[in-house]
Image: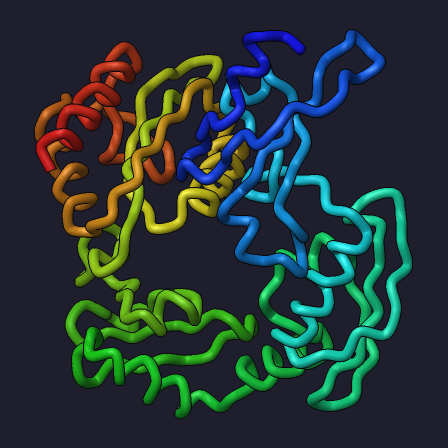
Amino acid sequence: MNKATNELIGHVYGQHRQLTVTGIGPARCAGYVRIVKVHCSICANDPELHGDAIFNTTASAVVKNFLPCACRSFYRWTKEQNVIRVRRKCNEIDSELLSVSYGSDARATRIHMKCNKDGHVWDSSLYSLLSDKTGCHICQRRDHTNRMTKDEAHFNVKFMSTGYFPMGTKFFRTDSLQHFDVHCPDCSTNGQLFRAAQTPLGRGCRPCNCKAAGGFDKRFPGYVYVLKIYSDDIEFTGYGITGNEQVRTHNHKVNLRNEGFLISEFESFYLKSGADVQKIEQMLVKKFPRFSQNVEGFRKEATYPWLYDDVVSFIEYQLTLL
């Protein structure tokens, strides 16, 4: 036995110090690499799923702090373990496991279930089932339809109950079930309406001109982001704030592409306080000279292209002061 490998016995490692080297197994044929056996104290809390929580790895993996157990992000579950996980998930979403059709991977493996609420028989991939919390898809679609088809009066009461809309605000359902036209008694002139989706309205986000920061809700966490944007004729640095980075980035890509622009660089910063997000945006407007152009979404929040790195550095510095 290699002396250096033998000295690993008793070594404790892992992000939570949960792994302990318990022994050295026989050498593998390929390359004569010895198997190192480790015990995970976290996985040991679930003996049904992990048994004695002893996992095989190598000495180099131990030294590099690689996790061999289910504590890592991409763990290769056995069929027996997946059956246990699926049964637990079915109990969680109030469904009965009927059968499993195994495929080449988690996305190709189909799980057939029966909904205990209404008796629906439905199926899902193993990957979707274990990452989804909604349960029966048939019930989910029905409940969604019921929510969307409630009358206008119901949503008027719901939105006004948030306490963020002034008295006299009216909400009118559009052809899209998820969007409403909003009439604000303070800033709707000549019958002007402001369109918004149901979800932000339900949080009290005002889509009209009364709401600063383009409807950003400072009650929730958010992002400050910076983009370097270019076309054949113009190049500039844009910035902004959002509560949903993924949706905002997608919308910018689509809108900019329609106007002949592309994004060459992108950086975002997550903040737990929405008030701090707005504060940093206001600092950016005051700190950096405005680059005049007529691109939708960046008519005010834009500066010169060579200042991209300076904007990113300024945000990073402000984050250290919070």
Location of residue 118 by image quarter: bottom right
- Residue at screen point 17% across, 22% down: 314
Between 307 and 90, the one lying in front of the other is 90
The answer to which of 159 and 98 lies nearer the viewer is: 98
Q: Is residue 39 above or below residue 288?
A: below
Instruction: Judge left or right: residue 265 versus residue 318.
Output: right
Q: Residue at x 14, y 29 (%)?
A: 320
Residue at 15 percent across and 37 percent down: it is 280
In x, y percent, where is residue 229? Answer: 40, 22
Residue 303 pos. (x, y %): 23, 22
In the rendered image of this protein, does residue 263 appear above or below residue 319?
A: above
Residue drawn at x 69%, y 61% as measured from the top left: 85
Residue 284 seen in the figure:
no
Say which quadrant the C terminus sits in. top left
Q: Quadrant of the N terminus?
A: top right
Q: Position of residue 90 (x, y in %)?
A: 69, 72
Count the labels in the image. Answer: 0
Query: Coloring scheme of the render?
Result: rainbow
Vertical position of residue 247 compared to residue 92: above or below: above
Residue toward you, 78 or 225? 78
Whether residue 190 is visible here, answered yes or no, is yes
Measured along the vertical axis of the image, is residue 40 above or below residue 266?
Answer: below
The quarter of the picture where residue 302 lies is: top left
Location of residue 221 in the rendering, given as x and y in whole percent from the top left corner: 28, 52
Q: Nearer the viewer, residue 125 or 212?
A: 125
